Amino acid sequence: MVIGGGISGLSAAWAVRQADPAATITVLEGSPTLGGKIASASIAGVWLDTGAESLLARRPEALQLIDELGLRDDVVHPATSQAAIWSRGGLHPMPSGTVMGIPSDPTSLSPLLTTAEIARVGQEILAEPAPGQDISVGDFVVARLGDAVVDRLIEPLLGGVYAGHAREISLAAALPTMLSAYQGGESLLEAARGALPAPLPDGAVKAPVFAGLRGGVHRLIDALAQALITSGVAIHTGVRAREIARRSSQNGGGFTVVTGPRPEPCEWRADRLIVATPPAPTARLLRALAPTAAEVLVTIETASMAIVTVALPGETAPRLSGSGVLVPPVEGLRVKASTFSGNKWDWVRASGAEAGERAVFVRASMGRHREESDLQRTDDELIQAVRHDLGAMLGQDVPRPIDAHVQRWGGALPQYAVGHRERIAAITSAVAAVPGLAVCGAAYDGVGIPACIASGRAAAAQASRAQ
């Protein structure tokens, strides 16, 4: 049995089915729909992603799953990946040659940073080696290169991935390629240069970093769910697991999963169990079964956010260049990032051209860790905030949308705080001590779609080995 019908849980069920075509597999999902943070909505008559909209193409797991589901012909790549950063009243091109904002060449940071700030970067301050220790990305970079790199470049980039704060996110978990520079006292600038891809031979085409699906990434969930159902997997939505108990050997072993209201509980029996829910509900489910894991899970905080998508009338929409804009928190705007969807994805532009008033789609993300107050506004207020902030960045009024959609994601993104890898090791060890049990999801080893698929596959393998 799999508890949780997001991409991690569905991938785990798919891995079990591939390994054992005769297995009886049940998926329980507490919400009315599958997909977790992969979702969609009809906006101005076009179905668009309202959660994750792309996947990392340099990892193989998502593209492999897409191949298995027969969707390879629908894989697309961004038409442009040139984003801008809004800083000090202007839009600046994203500096080249950086690793999650860490520069390999200080001169590339002009004009985003001032001359004095760039000079500080060039005067990197090395530190004593710190073998075996972790540190936040922000604290590490500030000590080496100064505040400006963190505040103006790393913060908006990490904020887009984790909706968190650079001075709290673990270097070991978020930027393991830079960990040796910290633990070994090496140059951060040199480490960034070493982490960049090797120069391409003449005539070679750079492999795309990101990919999507024509029609939206949400099609991956639709295809995966249909493949599971066709293979005999029973999927139940609107069924929330409330308790898990270990069955005695006299009762056949395995687990009992309790769902339904307390006055009328429903019991499910499972020989193997994969829990693919966020940290807080997983902790509640494992409290009696794996108490040490539960105690650690409750320490993993999450960030809430909202995705606001507006369809602007093409005749009066502002001119949009590049794939979008990232906004550093120090700028004080409520929008933390905006994607110009029609510029980024050809299929969105084509769909918008066919929609009413030749719609131009813009997507904005709002909300960061411990800043939920920004989201405690009505949908109309959030849409107005997007119009205001986008207008400020573009230097012109943003017209009233033809249509708009607000997708709220409460507790959507787990925070990889300093010491995250040690916490995950403790959870993994405690869960492994319970035969037949496994966990997976974005809270463990990566928040992207490929990482979640890998997590689901690993959980399927672990649950099977434990029998």
Image (spheres, rainbow, N blue to C red):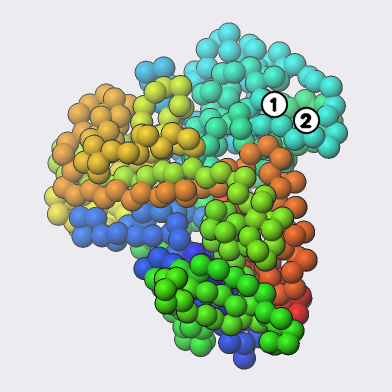
Of the residues shown, which amino acid type is indicated by label 1?
Phe
- Residue 229 can be seen, yes or no: yes
The residue closer to the viewer here, 262 or 195, is: 262
x 42%, y 73%: residue: 263
Left or right of 66, for residue 340: left
Which residue is the site of mark 2?
182
In the depicted structure, whether residue 50 falls above or below residue 196: below
Of the residues shown, which amino acid type is indicated by label 2?
Tyr
- Residue 195 can be seen, yes or no: no
Per the image, label 1 sits on a secondary structure element best described as helix
The residue closer to the viewer here, 247 or 88, is: 247
Quadrant of the rendered structure where residue 248 is?
Answer: bottom right
In the rendered structure, find residue 140 and report the number of the disc placed on it. Answer: 1
| Contact check, label 1 and label 2, Cβ < 8 Å | yes
Per the image, label 2 sits on a secondary structure element best described as helix
Q: Position of residue 92 (x, y in %)?
A: 44, 25
In the rendered structure, find residue 316 and report the number of the disc placed on it. Answer: none
The residue closer to the viewer here, 453 or 189, is: 453
Q: How crowded is mark 1: few (under 14 residues within 10 Å), some or many (20 or more)?
A: many
Q: Distance between the Cα atoms at labels 1 and 2?
A: 7 Å
Q: Position of residue 37 (x, y in %)?
A: 45, 57
x 41%, y 37%: residue: 372
Left or right of 142, for residue 335: left
x 28%, y 56%: residue: 350
Count of marks, rendered view: 2
x 75%, y 16%: residue: 125
